[in-house]
Each structure stands twice: as structure tokens, then as C-alpha cells.
Amino acid sequence: MPPTFDVIVIGVGGMGSAACFELARRGRRVLGLEQFPLVHDRGSSHGQTRIIRTAYYEHPNYVPLLRRAWVRWYELEQRIGRHLLTECPCLSIGLEDGELIRGVQASAAEHNLSVKNMTVTDIARRTPFRFPDGYAGVLERQAGFLAVEECVRAHVDAATALGAEIHAEEAVRSWKADGDEVEVTTDKETYRAARLVIAAGAWANPLLADLGVPLKVMRQVMLWIDVSANPYTFRRDHFPMFIAETPQGDFYGLPAIDEYGLKVARHYGAPELTSPDQVNWDATTEDVPPVKSFLDRHVLGAGGAVTN
């Protein structure tokens, strides 16, 4: 008996929804399984916005993927008729010889990307950032932010329009490979397919346990800061997205685009956990001091209260 689907995708968040759409676009019979309601807040694709960059400091090999991603986001906007990607410059700030600055410059040089190198004097003249001597900045224009929850919804809508089945609130209990097909059992049904994609995020560990692929979970908290006392300073036409590498940790942020204000978060810096069941999903008073300390040290006019 032939499998019911060509591909089953476990997890319909940022990665899984995109996989469902792309597979359906290629004519595959697709089933997407999501344990939570669609566009939920238990994965990595929530919290209003996510940064998209091109001059990836992590490695120059990412740059061709990012260039392709820009094209595909614009194509998705046209397909569904909704705005997803807002262009906004990104300013990377760090020690002149640090990993961040050297990485951005290396990617830009290898792929001939348009960036602007900035001294701390340049940065202070054009932005509210204040950093001591020994730091530098790189401003890249091909950057922006995505309306992350709308991106998930857009991929789901586009996939279903092409015939994909998306089942929300249906948790996967197990899967197994059986010859040339896979069998996936949920709390409601058993399904068969020729191929399986696992995009379960923090919940991937039990699904990958038999393959010996241990993963860690890290809680990441985003905060919004009231900047209503300086509304123009932090508006998108005046204030860039940023990534800052400091001795106190790495931080990133986005301009104020609504009443909640400036969005800022610490990048990494939290304990690695073995299960999402160990995660506290609410922001706590302990999450605030590192971010406020960074803002007090380095961003003039960003001393407002946490709004969200």
C-alpha cells in the first residue's frame, strides 16, 4: 500500500511552515503536524519581529543563502499579498579586532557587500550609541526585520492553498522508518509518508533520541523599553537595528515601531537546558538588569521602563 503523503513535516513554526510551503510548491503531497495552535508563542518564531541580515559575521558561507532568502521573502509577499519584510539598516558594534566586526567585514569583503565602516566618533555623531575607544562599527544596508508571526501564517496559508494539509493541536507521539517509508503516530492518528522532516524546535530531542542527536534548549527573553521621551531618536528612519558585542555579553535590538518602544534582548547568555519543560515562559525581574545595564552604558535616552 503506497504512503498517504510524500512528506510529513513535524512542527509548523518558522522552519516547518516554510518547509511545508516549499514542498507543496514543488508538487509534493504534504502533511504538517503542529502540537500547539498555529502561530503560537512556544517556539522561536514569535515576539513580533526577527532581524534579517546579509553580511553574516558567523561565516561568509551564509551570504549566498541570505541573498536567496531575500528573494524568496519578496516572492512570498507577492504570492499572498501581505507585507512581511521591512528594510532597515543594521549596525554591528564591537571591538575592532573582535569576532563580530572581523566577521562582518570578512563576509562583506568575500561577497562584495556594501557596508560602511564606522569609528566610535562616527557612531556617536549619527546615533545615540556611546562606546569607548577600541570599538568600531559596520553599517550594512541590506538588512531588515520580518513580521515573524505573519511569516509563519503566510507560509501556512500559501502551503494550504497549494494542497498541503496542516493539522494544528495534534502532538506527535512517535515515528519509525519502515523500509521505504515512515510511520508517524500522533495522539489522534497514524500517518505514513515517503519522507519525514523534523522541525520541532525545542521539542526535537525526544523525536531524535534514537538517532543519538542530543540538543540543548536555551531560554531567550525579549524586552521592550519605553522611549516615548525620545520618540524620534528611536524611530526606524533615525535608529538602526543593532548587534553589540560587549564584555558584559552580546545584545541586539530593533527600532521602536509601535507603542511598546525599543526592542532589546541579550543574545545567548542563559543556561543550556535539556528540555523545554524546564523553561520559564514568562519574563522575570532577573531578566531586566543585564539589558538595562547595557542600555545605561551604551544607549543615550533609552532609560525608560520595560513595557512588555
Image (cartoon, helix red, strand yellow):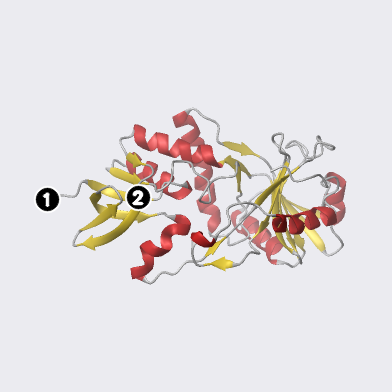
Q: Is residue 130 above or below residue 75?
A: below
Q: Is residue 34 left or right of residue 278?
A: left
Tag 2 secondary structure: strand
| CA neighbours of label 2 inside 10 A, class few (<14), some (14 to 19), many (20+) | many
In front of the other: 60 or 86: 86
Q: Residue at x 41, y 54 (%)?
A: 199
Residue at the image point whose x is 32% and y is 39% from the top:
164
Residue 258 locus on image (x, y percent): 69, 34
Closer to the camera in the image, 170 or 197 = 170
Q: Which residue is mark 2?
A: 9
Specify the quadrant of the image occupied by residue 233: top right
Percent across and percent down for residue 191 are 24, 50
Q: Earlier in the sequence, mark 1 or mark 2?
A: 1
50 horizontally vs 262: left or right? left
Q: Quick check: marks 1 and 2 in contact, CB under 8 Å?
A: no
Give the CA distance from mark 1 to mark 2. 21 Å
- The amino acid marked with disc number 2 is Val
Q: Which residue in the structure is indicated by mark 1? A: 1
Which sits in the foreground, 220 or 77? 220
In-image side of 118 versus 270 (left or right): right
Residue 219, compared with residue 35, is above or below; it is below
Write the residue at 55% across / 45% down.
46
Instruction: Identify the amino acid type marked 1.
Output: Met
Residue 156: percent from left, percent from top? 41, 38
**Quarter of the image that includes the C terminus:** top right
In front of the other: 67 or 288: 288
Q: What's the residue at 78%, 57% (across, down)?
A: 294
Say which element carries label 1. loop
Residue 92: x %, y % from top left: 72, 54
